[in-house]
Image (tube, rainbow, N blue to C red):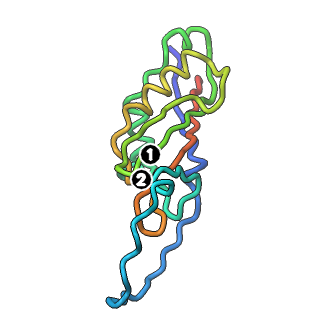
């Protein structure tokens, strides 16, 4: 039986993160509530990206534990990278899971979609200190060795 490797490309999760300490001024007024058009905006590059609970390493472990390489794909030697698009809602829920690129292998695509649809709630992205909707394209690589 061939050894199956499942790799996860984390292109969107590998950006540099910087932190700054800002003094708190108790006399500053709270920000006004967002407008309705602002609350529906989907950010591609928010100030703070959405994060899988426990970070990148936890996501890799989650996928490795739950992903089942399709048997027909193993028999036929099918491998490839499946690009999955999804939205992380303001409450961290994953929604609108679909293929980012059409014409990808159907068996591998079905499994990649299944795994992403099973994701637990993320820590939502933030813009101006508020949780916002954000989009993610996650490449999931299937490799037979």
Quarter of the image holding residue 84? top right
Q: Is residue 73 left or right of residue 66?
A: right
Discs 1, 2 touching: Cβ within 8 Å: no
Q: Which residue is mark 2?
A: 55
Question: Where residue 49 sits: x, y (%)?
Answer: 49, 57
- Return the residue found at the far front: 36
Q: Residues within 10 Å of mark 2 (few under 14, many from 20)?
A: few
Quarter of the image holding residue 28? bottom left
Callout count: 2
Q: Residue at x 38, y 37 (%)?
A: 119
Answer with mark 1 or mark 2, whichever residue precedes in sequence: 2
The foreground one among 39 and 47 is 39
Q: Residue at x 62, y 30 (%)?
A: 81
Residue 11 against residue 97 in the figure, above or below: below
Tag 2 secondary structure: loop
Question: Where residue 86 sits: x, y (%)?
Answer: 50, 38
**Which is in the foreground here, disc 1 or disc 2?**
1
Q: Which residue is mark 1?
A: 88
Tag 1 secondary structure: strand
The foreground one among 79 and 18 is 18
Q: Residue at x 56, y 8 (%)?
A: 75
Q: Residue at x 48, y 34 (%)?
A: 96
The foreground one among 109 and 93 is 93
Q: Is residue 89 left or right of residue 100?
A: left
Question: Where residue 29 sits: x, y (%)?
Answer: 37, 83
Q: Residues within 10 Å of mark 1 (few under 14, many from 20)?
A: many
Say which quadrant the C terminus sits in: top right
Question: Where residue 90 sits: x, y (%)?
Answer: 39, 51
Residue 49 against residue 145 in the figure, above or below: below
Residue 116 against residue 49 in the figure, above or below: above
- Determine the CA span between mark 1 and mark 2: 15 Å
């Amino acid at each position: 039986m061939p050894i199956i490797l499942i790799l996860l490309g984390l292109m969107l999760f590998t950006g540099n993160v910087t932190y700054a300490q800002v003094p708190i001024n108790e006399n500053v007024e709270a920000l006004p509530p967002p407008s309705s058009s602002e609350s529906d905006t989907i950010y591609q590059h928010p100030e703070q990206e959405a994060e899988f609970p426990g970070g990148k390493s936890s996501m890799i472990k989650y996928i490795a534990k739950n992903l089942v390489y399709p048997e027909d794909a193993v028999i036929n030697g099918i491998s490839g990278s499946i690009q999955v698009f999804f939205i992380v809602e303001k409450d961290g829920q994953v929604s609108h899971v679909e293929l980012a690129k059409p014409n990808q292998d159907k068996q591998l695509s079905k499994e990649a979609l299944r795994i992403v649809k099973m994701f637990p709630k993320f820590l939502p992205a933030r813009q101006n200190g508020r949780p916002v909707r954000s989009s993610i394209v996650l490449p999931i690589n299937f490799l037979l060795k």
